[in-house]
């Protein structure tokens, strides 16, 4: 049992690093959807391990879909974080590009 808990912590830490978050206690790093898309190859490589290690209610998006969008990848991170009593908080911000305001979503771990 203890081995399984340690394995889950290690997998969670690896997933966080794929999303450019420095660890489970890093509450200052802010990520975007683009950084979530950059984590896609790592999440796909870890998919089987995540599905066997974590309970079903914390891997719902990972099980149900095969092609992941940025929103799906954030949902996967959110579900894994919930298992470890952490939260992913969303903020919307505006970014100006070529005289147009564009809405972007920013995420960080609490």
Image (cartoon, helix red, strand yellow):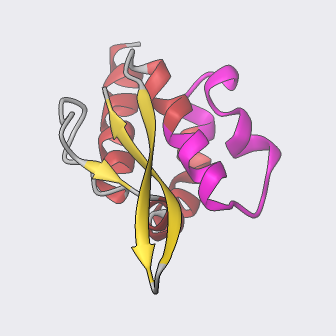
Q: Residue furthest bottom?
A: 98
Quadrant holding the C terminus: top left
Rendered view: 16 above or below 41 = above
Residue name at image x 40 percent, y 30 percent: 8
Examine the residues drawn in magenta and state their main secondary structure.
helix
Image side of residue 3 versus residue 51, left or right: left
Q: Which residues are magenta?
A: 51-77
Q: Residue furthest front?
A: 99
Residue name at image x 45 percent, y 70 percent: 38
Residue name at image x 43 percent, y 40 percent: 91
x, y (%) of residue 40?
53, 65
x, y (%) of residue 9?
32, 30
Rendered view: 4 above or below 50 = above
Rendered view: 6 above or below 43 = above
x, y (%) of residue 90?
46, 37
Residue name at image x 18 percent, y 40 percent: 28
Which quadrant would residue 108 be assigned to in this image? top left
Q: Residue furthest right?
A: 64
- Is residue 35 something one can see in this rendering? no
Quadrant holding the N terminus: top left
x, y (%) of residue 45?
53, 63
Image mark count: 0
**Viewer-nearest residue: 60 or 91:** 91
Image side of residue 83 versus residue 67, left or right: left
Image side of residue 24 versus residue 40, left or right: left
Q: Is residue 59 magenta?
A: yes
Q: Is residue 43 magenta?
A: no
**Viewer-nearest residue: 91 or 3:** 91
């Amino acid at each position: 049992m203890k081995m399984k808990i340690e394995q889950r912590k290690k997998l969670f830490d690896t997933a966080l690093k794929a999303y450019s978050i420095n660890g489970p206690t890093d509450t200052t790093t802010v990520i975007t959807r683009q950084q979530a898309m950059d984590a896609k190859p790592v999440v796909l490589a870890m998919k089987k391990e995540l599905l066997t290690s974590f309970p079903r209610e914390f891997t719902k998006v990972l099980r149900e879909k095969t092609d992941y969008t940025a929103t799906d990848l954030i949902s996967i991170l959110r579900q894994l974080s919930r298992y470890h009593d952490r939260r992913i908080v969303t903020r919307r911000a505006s970014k100006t590009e070529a005289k147009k305001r564009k809405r972007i979503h920013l995420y960080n771990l609490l």
